[in-house]
Amino acid sequence: MQQKNRVILIHGLHQTAWIMRPLAKCLQAAGFDTHQFGYRSMRDGIKTNSARLNSWLEENHHPDQPIDLVGHSLGGLIIRDFITEYPKWQIGRCVTLGTPHIGSVCADYIWRLTPAVVGRSYVDALDGTVAPLPEHITLGVIAGNHPKGLGQFFLQYHNRKLRKADNIPSAEHLLHDGTVYVEETKIKSATDHIILPVSHTGMLVDKTVAKQTAHFLQHGQFRR
């Protein structure tokens, strides 16, 4: 049996490494070696956090050994920046969970009202200006459509604004996970994209999300 790559799990905004533990345990049960990478999402910007991930790998991982990357929300944007900034690492497959690849409407509202709430993770990341994904990367994207979370107030407000506009969007374009729109998770360079009935934070403890993540890391596509 071919040895599986080490999987680096990267959390999102306002979180710490421990929140990725349930997903890590599921991946370990599937035979993966995992590491939960922690970073300061408020105090440091995306460039600093990518550099910190690179430093950790230099101290703990040999560049000849491929790694897989799994990121939740902002963590998925760090993956994109890290891959671009540090091309020496061999990247196997990547999975993002609820990552706003084209920017976050919710973060936009919060940034305008109380920028301290999103800290330094807005500029070059949540504002939609993160580096594009290199073409050789195999990326699977998981989005949630269960609208439950702290950001739903802003998204409900935004949906009402869209409905009042002359160009009324389809119901599909209004779907979100309580923090991130399904449409915001889409990126043209993705290899596969699925939508699951989970909320933004709930996807981290959902067994189906964990199984689909493991399946993509093993096969390069989601199970259907």
Image (cartoon, rainbow, N blue to C red):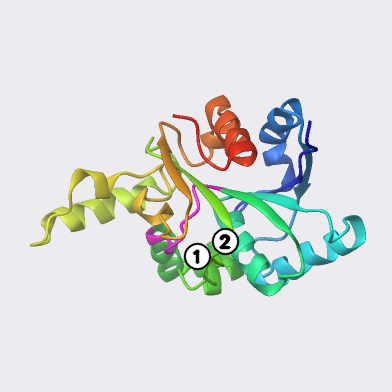
Disc 2 residue type?
Answer: Leu
Q: Residue 126 got which mark? A: 1
Residue at image position (83%, 54%) is 65
Q: Which residues are magenta?
A: 96-105
Residue at image position (62%, 53%) is 14
Q: Distance of mark 2 from mark 1, alpha carbons? A: 8 Å
Q: Which residue is mark 2?
A: 77
Q: Secondary structure at mark 1?
A: helix
Does the residue at mark 2 contact the one at mark 1 (Cβ under 8 Å)? yes
Q: Secondary structure at mark 2?
A: helix
107 above or below 6?
below
**Residue 13 in view of the camera:** no
Binning the other alpha carbons within 10 Å of mark 2 as few (below 14), some (14 to 19) or many (20 upward) gives: many
176 above or below 135?
above
Quadrant location of the C terminus in the rendered image: top left
Q: Residue furthest front?
A: 1
Left or right, residue 72 beside residue 24: left
Residue at image position (45%, 37%) is 199
